[in-house]
């Protein structure tokens, strides 16, 4: 048996309590609940990446930037729905540098998280060419995205 930080038998016992037919198809909330129960049961702290909140200390440069933004009054106004021109240029540069794809800055759309981003992407793609009504996922994917597709009336 492999040496793991948490006893595999304990993990199996906790997962079995959730009556999941396949843990690979668990929802994010189920994964969070299982991880939380394992932390409580074993005393072993987990790094939580499932909801974008890993529980790691923030980098000081980010903290300083947030403080500066708050001191400039950022909390008293809604952000521009189109995003910051400066950040959109940076996003386009990032895509070019890491994926070698040219994207115009105006094609970089700010979203509050990956669920909103994928939902907006599915809506946009589904309306470009109505005869193309099927989204292909590389499994295992995220069950919530398949739920989004179903709500929109697309196939996958």
Image (tube, rainbow, N blue to C red):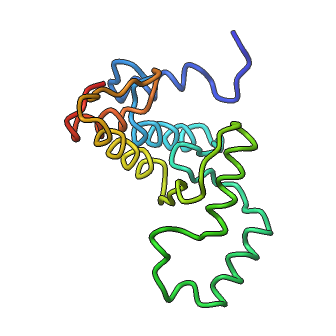
Q: Residue at x 42, y 44 (%)?
A: 118
Against 123, is 105 above or below?
A: below
User: Residue 70, located in which quarter of the rendered image?
Assistant: bottom right
Residue furthest to the top in view is 1
Q: Position of residue 43 (x, y in %)?
A: 63, 42
Q: Position of residue 85 (x, y in %)?
A: 61, 69
Residue furthest to the right in view is 60
Q: Position of residue 28 (x, y in %)?
A: 43, 40
Q: Pick the quarter of the image with the N terminus.
A: top right
Question: Front-most of 34 and 83?
Answer: 83
Q: Residue at x 54, y 44 (%)?
A: 40
User: Residue 122, located in which quarter of the rendered image?
Assistant: top left
Q: Does 62 sit left or right of 111 as displayed?
A: right
Q: Residue at x 54, y 39 (%)?
A: 41
Question: Front-most of 94 and 10?
Answer: 94
Q: Does 103 sit left or right of 114 as displayed?
A: right
Counting the numbered discs, the total is 0
Question: Front-most of 140 and 78?
Answer: 78
Against 6, is 94 above or below?
A: below
Against 137, is 36 above or below?
A: below
Q: Residue at x 31, y 24 (%)?
A: 156
Q: Position of residue 132 (x, y in %)?
A: 29, 28
């Amino acid at each position: 048996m492999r040496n793991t930080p948490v006893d595999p038998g304990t993990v199996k016992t906790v997962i079995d309590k959730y009556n999941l037919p396949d843990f690979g198809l668990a929802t994010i909330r189920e994964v969070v609940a299982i991880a939380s129960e394992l932390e409580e049961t074993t005393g072993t702290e987990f790094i939580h990446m499932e909801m974008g909140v890993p529980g790691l200390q923030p980098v000081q440069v980010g903290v300083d930037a947030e403080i500066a933004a708050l001191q400039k009054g950022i909390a008293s106004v809604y952000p521009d729905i189109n995003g910051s021109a400066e950040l959109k240029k940076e996003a386009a540069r990032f895509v070019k540098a890491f994926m070698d794809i040219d994207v115009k800055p105006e094609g970089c759309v700010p979203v509050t998280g990956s669920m909103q981003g994928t939902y907006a992407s599915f809506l946009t793609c589904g309306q470009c060419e109505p005869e193309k009504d099927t989204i292909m996922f590389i499994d295992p994917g995220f069950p919530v995205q398949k739920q989004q597709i179903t709500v929109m009336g697309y196939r996958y």
